[in-house]
Image: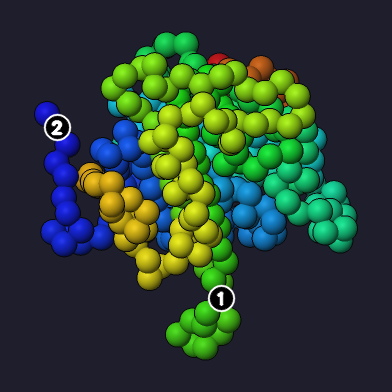
Amino acid sequence: MAEATVELSDFNFAGDDRVVPFQVEGLDVRGRAVQLGPLLNAILGRHEYPAPVARLLAEAIVLTALLGTSLKFDGKFTVQTKGDGPVDLLVADFTSPDSLRAYARYDEDALAAAVADGKTSPPELLGAGVLAFTIDHGHGMQPYQGIVPLDGSSLEEIAGVYFRQSEQIPTKVRLGVAELLDRDEAGKPRHNWRAGGLVAQFLPQAPERMRQPDLHGGDGDEREHDHSEDDAWSEARVMVETIDTDELTDPQVPIERLLFRLFHERGVRVYKPQSVLDRCSCSRERLKGILDSFSAEEIEASEQDGEIAVTCEFCSTTYRFSPEEFTAA
């Protein structure tokens, strides 16, 4: 059954934490767009990340929401970076139908030195390494993983390269993060994180229209200025490049309005939005199953003050176990 489409005048805007699929028929483009608010605040707030780390993780969260909600099966989609920079690990995963979680690992001293030196761009914080996209179908099936290098580009640029190299789909990604300052009911200063993103892909009916030359082999990658790319995709790509961070994150500019501004002359359609929730997959039962596999020596080494405490890196929930649960006969 085809997805129902609506016009801007016929519906309430999706609002925060809901991914909006869209299609631009005149340009053979399909995509997804989102603005994140409460979900992002909850994830970043429980860890109290320094601002440069929070911004990086927020971008990974937006990218995961955009791509994870495109899954057509029950499974998990993960975005993960591993690098040698001050922020050596970012992980965000989406478990269908709507659960998203994320965390970052960083070296406090290295981060402080980078901030003092003004080296806080994504490439400087992540360093050299890889960005991995993993799709896990579950049910004992082998996960699929695509890997691209962290090559000194932004996450949105690297994601575009991944789709071109691994999926052969011309793709443009825009990500934006903002920290908004206001006051609470008592007049005390507070900040809120907001983020937004859009992914557009060129999917014409004629496969040969998607073909593009291989990536440039030298230092000067010319992928963004390929004179042989399809005119429709060139137009769509340029439109997406005009989006700025304020438009992606402004709570007064719903994502549907942004899509209309970009593509109304080409016939943009939006589809039913999909919610994303701040929901972790950890549980006491799952952790107990892991501890059940430990040897007696490992259980003893894990004990502290008469208990075994395990804290989830994603949601910061601490689960406490008695050693006797694992050493009894």
Res. 176 in view: yes
Q: Quadrant of the C terminus?
A: top right
Secondary element at image label 2: loop
Which mark, by number, is residue 2?
2
Q: Residue at x 31, y 33 (%)?
A: 28
Could one spot residue 201 in this view of the protein?
A: no
Q: Position of residue 57 (x, y in %)?
A: 60, 48
Q: CA distance from mark 2 to mark 1?
A: 42 Å
Would you place residue 311 above or below residue 183 in this image? above
Q: Are the residues at dot 2 and dot 1 in contact (C-beta closer than 8 Å)?
A: no
Question: Where residue 77 appears, x then y in whole percent?
Answer: 46, 30
- Residue 240: x, y in percent? 46, 48
Identified by mark 2, the residue type is: Ala
Give the residue furthest to the bottom. Answer: 187
Q: Secondary structure at mark 1?
A: strand
Direction from residue 4 to residue 229 in the image, left or right: right
Relative to 82, is 329 on the left or the right? left
At 56% from the left edge and 76% from the top edge, which residue is drawn? Answer: 181
Could you classify mark 2 by the number of other residues whose Cα lies within 10 Å: few (under 14), some (14-19), or many (20 or more)? few
- Residue bearing mark 1: 181
Q: Amino acid at mark 1?
A: Leu
Quadrant hosting residue 29:
top left
**Image quarter (top left, top right, bottom left or bottom right) of the N terminus:** top left
Note whether 53 is above or below 216 in the view shown.
Answer: below
- What residue appears at the point 33 percent right and 50 percent down from the top-left corner? 263
| Residue 235 vs residue 51, the one in the foreground | 235
In-front residue for pair 160/128: 160
Q: Earlier in the sequence, mark 2 or mark 1?
A: 2
